[in-house]
Image (cartoon, rainbow, N blue to C red):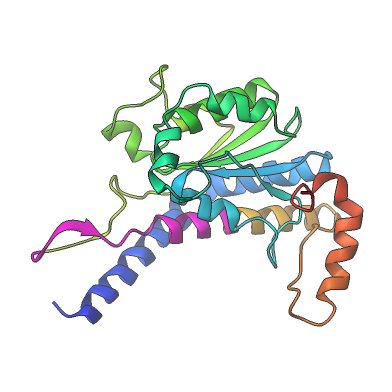
Amino acid sequence: MGDSKLAERFFDAATDLLRQVRDEEAEAIAAAGTLIADTVADGGRLFAYGAGHSSLAAQDMVYRAGGLALMNLLAVPGAVGVEAPATLGSALERVDGLATAVLDTSPLSSGDLLVIISLSGRNALPVEMAAHARELGVRVIGVTSVAYASQTASRHASGTYLKDHCDVVLDSKIPVGDAELTTENIEAPFAPASTVVTTALLQAVMATAAGTLADRGTEPPLLRSGNVDGGHEWNGRIMREYGDRIFYLRS
């Protein structure tokens, strides 16, 4: 099979997943967007954490043109993306107690909101993070593939998954294994779509949050591109107004 056909198959698979998420997760997207808008309006802070490659979707919401300026990245040392050694992040996801230590030393407090992104939702870190965040009075939006809960075993002592500790769950619909293509002459499945779908899902949520704030008569604190005229001036105003809720400006 030629490369062009494989590329077409991947685009078709990703497009089908995007349509499925759009159609089946509309209610959850609306709920998540409303929860974010409520948090902004009530003076709360926004944070996002992504485990492994899920960190890409978390980082996509932070300090970017067209995004809410208030979204901050919650960093777990050694488990942000695929830092070298890449295998360390995977190992740390299975360590009990790490999430609690991270949250207890973070700026998060009651009334804030935390987006937790974990494709499998089965490892100790995202499960513990969601459960402890709610104990602290933090609202939690979980982004995961719910299919993992029925096809894999939890790695948390409670036997639960990320989806079990959230105020709103967004199901990315990604099949277990996160690879969309197979072909006769390649033994392993390949071409993961989780980053494409999860990022789109969360941007839909952020768009909903911005629209909800606007409908209530509140200007959503959005950032503009620094590469358009007037962008830096616009962003400077937003950051002055909301500086006490923006943590990525600090060392």
Give left or right: position of 16 versus 118.
Answer: left
Closer-to-camera residue (108/139): 108
**Does the segment drawn in magenta span residue 141?**
no
Quarter where residue 4 is shown: bottom left
51 in relation to 98, above or below: below
Which residue is rendered at x = 67% and y = 43% of the image?
A: 47
In the rendered image, the quadrant that contains the N terminus is bottom left
Q: Which residues are magenta?
A: 184-203
Q: Residue 160: percent from the left, percent from the top?
A: 41, 23
Which residue is rendered at x = 85% and y = 54% of the image?
A: 218
**Does the segment drawn in magenta span residue 189?**
yes
Instruction: Count every numbered label the image shows and give the total.
Output: 0
Give left or right: position of 58 versus 66.
Answer: left
Q: Residue 246: percent from the left, percent from the top?
A: 79, 49
Quarter where residue 161 is shown: top left
Quarter where residue 115 is shown: top right
Which residue is rendered at x = 64% and y = 38% of the image?
A: 114
126 in relation to 225, above or below: above
- Looking at this view, name the residue that lies furthest to the front: 85
Q: Residue 54: percent from the left, percent from the top?
A: 48, 49
173 in relation to 94, above or below: below
Q: Residue 22: percent from the left, percent from the top?
A: 47, 57
Closer-to-camera residue (74/141): 74
Give left or right: position of 143 versus 182.
Answer: right
35 in relation to 132, above or below: below
Which residue is rendered at x = 82% and y = 52% of the image?
A: 216
Closer-to-camera residue (60/94): 94
- Looking at this view, name the residue that lies furthest to the left: 184
Give left or right: position of 40 versus 128.
Answer: right
